[in-house]
Structures are given as C-alpha cells and as structure tokens.
Image (cartoon, helix red, strand yellow):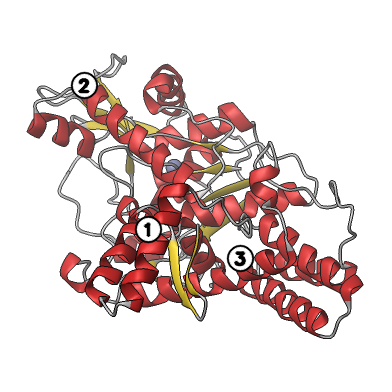
Amino acid sequence: MYVCGPTVDNLPHIGHGRYNLVFDILRRYLLFGGLAVHYVSNITDVDDKIIKRAAEEGRTEPEVAGEYETRWWEAMDGLGVLRPDVSPHATAYIADMVALVADLIRRGVAYETSDGVYLDVSQVDGYGLLARQSLDSLRAGARVEENEEKRSPLDFAVWKMAKEGEPSWDAPWGAGRPGWHTECVVMSLDLLGDGFDLHGGGRDLAFPHHENERAQAVAEGRPFARHWVHNGWVEVEGTKMSKSLGNFTSLTDLLSRVDERAYRLLVLRAHYRSPIEVTPETVADAEKALERLDGMARRFGLPDLLERSERGYVVAGEGDAVGIDEDALASFRARMDDDMDTPGALAGVFELVTAAHSAADAGAENEVQRLARTAAVLAAALGLAVRGGAAEVDEAAAKLVAERDEARQAKDFARADALRDELVSLGWTVEDTPGGTAIRR
Ligand SMILES: [Zn+2]
C-alpha cells in the first residue's frame, strides 16, 4: 500500500486523522486476515508552504519540516495508527526524480518552459481516469492559463525552476525542485515496484494529484497502482472551525480533550467514502459507545488485546484459547470484504456486546466468554482497543475519593466538584454511585 503522507508545515488537522485512521483500519483488516502488508507513506519535506513558514519564522526549511514531522508522529501514535513500514522523505529522492524528469523529456512527453518542466497530458493514454472525466471535458472545465508557454492548462509541473532564496537542486534544464506529483510516483514505484496493489489518499487527491502520478507512470510505460482508495471529507459542523463554537481545531487539540479511541470509532461508524461530521456531540456519542465496550470488558474481565500484542495488531485465530464465534466472524468478514463496510462490521461488534450481557443475565456462562471475547477480538481487528482492566487506584487518588465523599456528605458541593475536577485532571473518570464516588481510568 502507498498512502500519500503529509506536508510537514503545520500541526496535523482532523482530516489528516481521518485518512490515517481509514488506511490504518484497512491495513489492520488485511493483517487480521493473514496477509503480509508493506505500507509506505511519504513525508513531503520540501514545498511552498514549508518555504513560506521558514521565511516567516527565520528558520531553515529542515528545521520547520523536522519540528512538524515530530508533531505528526506524536499525533499518529496518539491515535493508535501503526507506523508505516517505510516513510520516505522527498528530499532523499531528488536524484531519482531528476532522472524521471530527464526521461520524460527524452521521450518527448515533458517540455521545458522558463518557469519549469511540464508534462503534456494529451500524450497520456486514459488521462482523466481518476477524475472520471474525458480529456475534452477536463479541458472545457480548466481555468484560463496565465503561463503562455504551457501547451494546455491541464499540463502540470514535474519540475519547478528555483526562485530567489528558495532551496534548489541542480538539473540539466535548470536548478529547482521537483513537483509534488513527481515525488509520489517515484517513491511508490521505487519502494513497492511496478503494479503495486493499492494506492490511497483523501478524496481531494484523486484529481489532480493521483491522476498526475499515474500519468507519469503511464508515460514511462510502467504499470502503476492496481487499486485506488479515496476517503471522504471531514465536516466540522458545516461551518468554519472555531474555538468559540467548541470545535476541535487540530488533531492535537482533539486528542488532548477526548479518549483517542473515540475518533477511531467515529470514523468506523461511517463508510470510508462518506463524509463524517466531527463535532463535540458526535465525539461525545462515540465516547458513549466506547463505554459500552469497556463496560463489557470490565464485567467479563477481558484483557486489552492490542496492548498485549507485541506487534500492535491482532491476527485471526492467533492465541484464541476460548474459541471465537464463527458465525459472527464470518459476518464480520463479509461486511468488511464488501468495500470495507465498517458501519456494518461495527454494528456486529455491538450486537455481540448485547448478546454477551443477555447470556450473562440468563446465566449462560459458557456462552458469555465466547461472545464477549469475539466482540473484543473483532474490535481489536479494527484497531479499537477494549479496556476493561480496572487500573490500580493509587493512594493519592484514593485520598481524593475519600475527601470528595466527605464533602458530598457535608453538602459542600463546590468542594466536591473541585475534587472531581482534580481526579479528572489526573486521568480518572468519576462516577457517583449509591456507594459513593467510583473512579476508573
Ligand atoms: Zn502523493
């Protein structure tokens, strides 16, 4: 799999989180089925936006890119997204990109102008495949071109000539840097080989980014990706993001405020090609659903399979002593194999949760473990950890709990609320029960 990675010029936003979750879920499902997956996702570490930020902040481009790449991995780790097997950096592939551009010129598919080298898309068979439009209809919809040296407004830069003060690399046709579309085609073919299985990215990348990657491979006579997967948008209350509306402004912000599994669950609830809405309400709703999973794990004493797995993912049938519910597994697979129907697959997991509770209430003990365990395994197959382990309540937390119960008995609710906030800030979930304050991680 090749999944287009980030340009590291800023903090990751919520849309970055979604596409990484979508492809993490797909990757995990393939691994769960016993397939070997080689996952490549690039880092664009040279780009207009990085150059601009570096200039504004009086830093070098590598400093800016280095900082935001670190923040990127922190956020992805926080989301529970498996790291790529390889994450190539664009700047490490410049020589290969120069070689590709040289070859495209030699073949007469690319041409030089004063500001860069462009690919002549009219020479590419099937251009418009990913846009799902013909070349003629793409031409009709294209913007009026300002650069008069370009043969068609659809032609795209495979090389941009250097401007004053910008980072640049030498090339026979003039110093500069490669176009973004050239980056991904070179790195994906180098690391995965001709005719690799799957190329993914957000829906906005289908055209022109992926179209143009493909165009270069076709012009070179090389088989490119055999399957394309594009995920849908993220909508934030249908309006612009704003802190005053209580929206989540960045992925880092979201992760600091909610259980990181809630976003994965929210993503799973929608088909990957559909838009999702990320609002305080939809996130809170996802957290409630998580609580159903964790509540099941607490009641039946299930371990967190993902935490226990050294590789960070689960494989069907592995270490399954209790025995899985084969019908539930088959229906889970049928749903996932149907163009990744995660809403259906997740609904199946929750049906198992309900069934496990019913079996326990009816005293059918032998059923309970099988159903509950199957729910946990299938959730883990989607990367969703089920956490029932009651964390040890440390002395400091126990003291706060006791103080809070005293405050409540004395009807000092302001103090009780302050103690609750203190517990929450220490990472505890606080519940009022008939027996007093109950806390859990
Ligand atoms: Zn790309």
**Viewer-proximal residue, 413 or 347?**
413
- Amino acid type for the residue under numbered disc 2: Pro
Q: Residues within 10 Å of mark 2 (few under 14, many from 20)?
A: some
Q: Mark on residue 311?
A: none
Of the residues shown, which amino acid type is indicated by label 1? Leu
Task: Give the tally of numbered discs.
Answer: 3
Residue in the foreground of this view, choosing between 1 and 23? 23
On residue 400, the disc is 1
Residue at 68 percent of width and 64 percent of height: 297
Q: Is residue 51 left or right of residue 117?
A: left
Measured as percent of width and height from the top left, residue 19 is found at 47, 55
Nearest to N terminus: mark 3 or mark 2: 2
Depicted 424 relative to depicted 56: above or below: below
Report how far apart the C-alphas of labels 1 and 3 lie in the structure: 24 Å
Name the amino acid, label 3: Asp
Q: CA distance from mark 1 to mark 2?
A: 56 Å
Q: Residue sitting at 41 percent across and 34 percent down?
A: 43
Q: Position of residue 294 (x, y in %)?
A: 61, 65
Quarter of the image for the N terminus: give it. Answer: top right
- Tell me the number on the disc at residue 294: 3
Label 1, secondary structure: give it.
helix
